[in-house]
Amino acid sequence: QVQLVESGGGLVQPGGSLRLSCAASGIIFRLYRMGWYRQAPGKQRELVTTMTSSGSVNYADSVAGRFTISRDDANNTVYLQMNSLKPEDTAVYYCLARNILGNGVYWGQGTQVTVSS
């Protein structure tokens, strides 16, 4: 059974930082591109960032330079360090695991991030 469990969301003031974590189980972690998507109220889910085990990374333009993805393959965990947060970063953040061979996609339950003064 595949599980992706996110943690680290919460309320933060503009300009602040948060670190999200996603612990995976039930998959061969190194075979998965791990990443983060987000969905704001009334909007479609959108890509934030993803990373392969070999270090290939991509970022949405809206977060490049402020957010950093990393992964710990020994502990099956992916992280999202979010700095210089803006109110428009407010969303539910979802962890994603996509098999690099193309035969499996899994989502976490989501964690709320609210940026507000």
Image (spheres, rainbow, N blue to C red):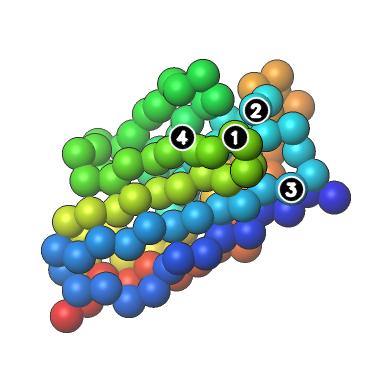
Horizontal relation, residue 99 to residue 12: left or right:
right
What percent of the width, then of the height, locates residue 53?
55, 25
What percent of the width, then of the height, locates residue 50?
46, 35
Horizontal relation, residue 71 to residue 48: left or right:
right
Residue at (46% x, 48% y) in the render: 79
Q: Quadrant of residue 62?
A: top left
Label ID, residue 50: 4
Mark 3, mark 1: which one is toward the viewer? 1
Distance of label 2 from label 4 (alpha carbons)? 13 Å
Residue at (32% x, 41% y) in the render: 68
Q: Secondary structure at mark 3?
A: strand
Q: Secondary structure at mark 1?
A: loop
Q: Residues within 10 Å of mark 3 (few under 14, many from 20)?
A: some
What percent of the width, then of the height, locates residue 55?
45, 22
Label ID, residue 73: 1
Distance of label 4 from label 1 (alpha carbons)? 14 Å
Label ID, residue 25: 3
Distance of label 2 from label 3 (alpha carbons)? 12 Å
Callout 4 amino acid:
Thr
Distance of label 1 from label 2 (alpha carbons)? 6 Å
Q: Are marks 1 and 2 in contact (CB under 8 Å)?
A: yes
**Residue 88 in view, yes or no:** no
Horizontal relation, residue 92 to residue 99: left or right:
left
Indicate which disc, 3 or 4, sits on the residue closer to the N terminus.
3
Q: Are marks 2 and 3 in contact (CB under 8 Å)?
A: no
Reply above or below: 31 against 14: above
Residue sticking out furthest to the bottom: 117
Reply above or below: 37 against 8: above
